[in-house]
Structure formats: structure tokens, C-alpha cells
């Protein structure tokens, strides 16, 4: 494997920040990653979601040049991670789900150690350490021993280590695991700042609600295969091509129940005291507008009609259930 930079063919625009094609990684008979393909565009924040053992960490470790695939191709900013691992490492910041530290070091000594290991010298090294401590709000803790840090402070230190060389792409494996609510909010704020600064962030987590708030898209994986890749926003409202609506009326809710049973594109999900919850079997604005128009024209006194946000956990479980029912049917790909 060479450390010589590859000659990347000239192309229109920038290459994907992360490109994965037909990735396979087996451990004996266990297929940890089984034909995974996806791409992440520069500047995106993408959430990587899956149950324990789904293949998340193995995929991330391969992208981070810490493991090798049995088959397939992975590139970071157009550079092959197997052929040019050293070059890729200069472009990525890796934050594992658990990280080793030297407990007898202080915060500033730890960051300085990694800045030295990355080849920074003199004033530039000092500046990088100072900038990272300022960004992660660790400056007041510069002289504190690492073994005296809280879990949240330790995660900020690990993020700082990943940022010390100012990489374009960040790969964060369960960065919020074990953090209290305040520390999770602080970490989420830092990640959003990095994204706004143009960094590409590829982040795994089991806390789906928080991923939905910070990610441009979500990538679901199960049993080593991608089962969904789409925008977080679309998942809140649609799954399987349908949309849920909460309808409030001024009249008898039984009337809307009767109407829903006779109306095309509509399924009654629940009757409520002041209306109903309905499912429209489309995401097209024209179809949804047509349903509302028919409702009003046919005498339903509509007071409110709004899309219902679906919990991302529910969307994930529904997509997982569809995949298991139609095993072998391929991934469910959403609007990206």
C-alpha cells in the first residue's frame, strides 16, 4: 500500500466525501457487512442507524482505515482507503465509541501528544491545541488529569483529538452514548457548528430523535445491509409512501369515520373526540389537497388539518418490519 497521493481524474465538482460500493466484511461465517453501498456528499451530516450487531461499527472502521474489506470499494474524498490509508487519515477525524486515554496526562498534554504524533511543530502545534480546547470548551480544564474528567468532558476531549488536524470528514461512532441530557445537548451543538463550517459528519447513534434534529439524512442498516437512505424530514411524515394527518372537526367525529371508509386514498387510523387520525396513501401534494377538498365539499366541518410527525423510532421499526417481511427484496430508498 502506497502513501503516494493518487491522481484523481478531473471531474465536475467535488467527489463524494464518502463513497461505499458493494462493501463486504466477513468474520468466519459471520457476514458483518453484506454488500453495503451508499455515498455522502461534502458538507452533509448523515446519521448511521442500526441495532447492535447490524454492521455500523465495522463499516465505520473500514472507512476510518482501521479494518479492511473482503470485497468492495471505499473512498474518502475520492481516495481509496485500502490503497492510500495514510492519505485518507489526514482527511478524516475518527471518534470511536470508546477511546483509550493516558490517565496520568492532563487535557492539554493529551492533545499536544496527538498534535505531535500528527507532525505539527512549534507555534502551529500550540495554536492547534489552543483552538481545539477553545472550540470544545476545555480551556478551563487544560491542566486537569484525564481520569478526573466526567463522561461528557471525556467525549469532548475525544472530539477535540479528532479535530486536531482540521479534517474535512468526521466519523463519529456513538458519540452521545452514556452522556447525560446536558452533555448530549452540548455535543449536538458542537456537531452542528462543525457542519455549518462545511465539515462532513458521519455519525452513528441509537438516539434517533437527536439524529433527526441534527442530520440531513439517515442511513439505516440491518444484518449488514442498507435498508433505507433518505432525508430525516421525510421520515417524520412518511413511510411506505403514505402520510399521516390529524384532522379536527367541529361536528360529530363519527361522520368523518364514515366518510373515511368510503373515500379513496384514505384509511381511518383512529377516531378521536374532536376528529380523527387518517392515513393518506400518497405523499403527492395534489392527492393530499384533493382529499382535503373532498372532505370540505362533502360537508365535513374541518377546523384543523395537519401532518402528524412520526417518531423516527417508529419509522425505523416499520422499515425494519417491511424488510423482514420481504427478505431479499432489496433496500428501501427514500428521498435524499
Image (cartoon, helix red, strand yellow):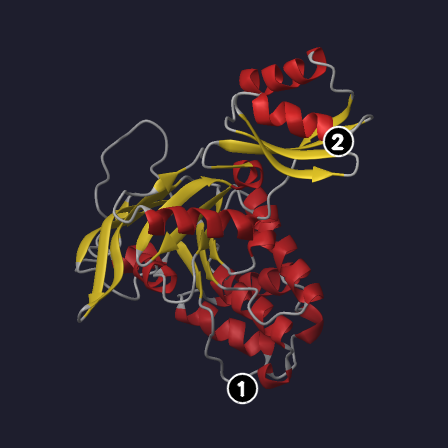
Q: Quadrant of residue 330?
A: top left
Number of other residues with Cα within 10 Å of mark 2, as a class: few under 14, some 14 to 19, many 20 or more: some
Residue drawn at (65%, 19%) of the image: 292
Residue drawn at (74%, 15%) of the image: 299
Closer to the camera in the image, 127 or 263: 263
- Judge depth for marks 1 and 2 and give the one in front: 2
Q: Quadrant of the N terminus?
A: bottom left
Query: According to the image, label 2 marks what residue?
Result: 253
In the rendered image of this protein, does residue 187 appear above or below residue 283? below
In the rendered image of this protein, does residue 263 appear above or below residue 333? above
Whether residue 52 can be seen here: yes
Circle 1: element type: loop
x and y percentages locating residue 110 in the rendered image:
52, 76
Residue drawn at (62%, 60%) of the image: 187
Closer to the camera in the image, 144 or 224: 224
First in sequence: mark 1 vs mark 2? 1
Q: Looking at this rendering, what residue extends furthest in the top direction?
A: 297
Question: Going by the image, does 176 lie left or right of 7?
Answer: right
Question: Going by the image, does 292 lie left or right of 263?
Answer: right
x and y percentages locating residue 36 in the rendered image:
28, 50
Q: Quadrant of the C terminus?
A: top left
x and y percentages locating residue 171 in the rendered image:
43, 57
Q: Which numbered disc covers residue 103? A: 1
Question: Going by the image, does 110 lie left or right of 246?
Answer: left
Number of other residues with Cα within 10 Å of mark 1, as a class: few under 14, some 14 to 19, many 20 or more: few
Q: Looking at this rendering, what residue extends furthest in the right direction?
A: 250
Closer to the camera in the image, 255 or 1: 255
x and y percentages locating residue 281 in the rendered image:
50, 28
Circle 2: element type: helix
Whether residue 201 can be seen here: no
Question: Going by the image, does 51 lie left or right of 224?
Answer: right
Amino acid at each position: 500500500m502506497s502513501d503516494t497521493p493518487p491522481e484523481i481524474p478531473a471531474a465536475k465538482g467535488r467527489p463524494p466525501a464518502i463513497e461505499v460500493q458493494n462493501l463486504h466484511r466477513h468474520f468466519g461465517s459471520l457476514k458483518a457487512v453484506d454488500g453495503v453501498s451508499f455515498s455522502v456528499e461534502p458538507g452533509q451530516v448523515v446519521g448511521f442507524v442500526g441495532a447492535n450487531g447490524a454492521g455500523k461499527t465495522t463499516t465505520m472502521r473500514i472507512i476510518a482505515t482501521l479494518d479492511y474489506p473482503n470485497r468492495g470499494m471505499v473512498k474518502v474524498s475520492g481516495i481509496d482507503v485500502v490503497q492510500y490509508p495514510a492519505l485518507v487519515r489526514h482527511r478524516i477525524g475518527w471518534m470511536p465509541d470508546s477511546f483509550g486515554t493516558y490517565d496520568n496526562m492532563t487535557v492539554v498534554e493529551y492533545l499536544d501528544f496527538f498534535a505531535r504524533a500528527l507532525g505539527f511543530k512549534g507555534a502551529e502545534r500550540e495554536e492547534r491545541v489552543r483552538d481545539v480546547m477553545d472550540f470544545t470548551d476545555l480551556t478551563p480544564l487544560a491542566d486537569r488529569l484525564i481520569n478526573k474528567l466526567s463522561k461528557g468532558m471525556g467525549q469532548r476531549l475525544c472530539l477535540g483529538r479528532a479535530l486536531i488536524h482540521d479534517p474535512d470528514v468526521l466519523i463519529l461512532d456513538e458519540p452521545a452514548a452514556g452522556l447525560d441530557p446536558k452533555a448530549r445537548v452540548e455535543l449536538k451543538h458542537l456537531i452542528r457548528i462543525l457542519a455549518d463550517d462545511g465539515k462532513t459528519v458521519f455519525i452513528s447513534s441509537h438516539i434517533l430523535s437527536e439524529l433527526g434534529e441534527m442530520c440531513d439524512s439517515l442511513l439505516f442498516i440491518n444484518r449488514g445491509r442498507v435498508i433505507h437512505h433518505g432525508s430525516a424530514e421525510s421520515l417524520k411524515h412518511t413511510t411506505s409512501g403514505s402520510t399521516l394527518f390529524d384532522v379536527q372537526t367541529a361536528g360529530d367525529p363519527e361522520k368523518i369515520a364514515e366518510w373515511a371508509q368510503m373515500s379513496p386514498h384514505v384509511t381511518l387510523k383512529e377516531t378521536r373526540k374532536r376528529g380523527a387520525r387518517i392515513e393518506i396513501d400518497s405523499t403527492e401534494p395534489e392527492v393530499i389537497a384533493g382529499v382535503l377538498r373532498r372532505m370540505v365539499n362533502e360537508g365535513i366541518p374541518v377546523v384543523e388539518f395537519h401532518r402528524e410527525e412520526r417518531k423516527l423510532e417508529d419509522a425505523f421499526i416499520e422499515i425494519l418490519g417491511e424488510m423482514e417481511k420481504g427478505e431479499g427484496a432489496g433496500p428501501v430508498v427514500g428521498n435524499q
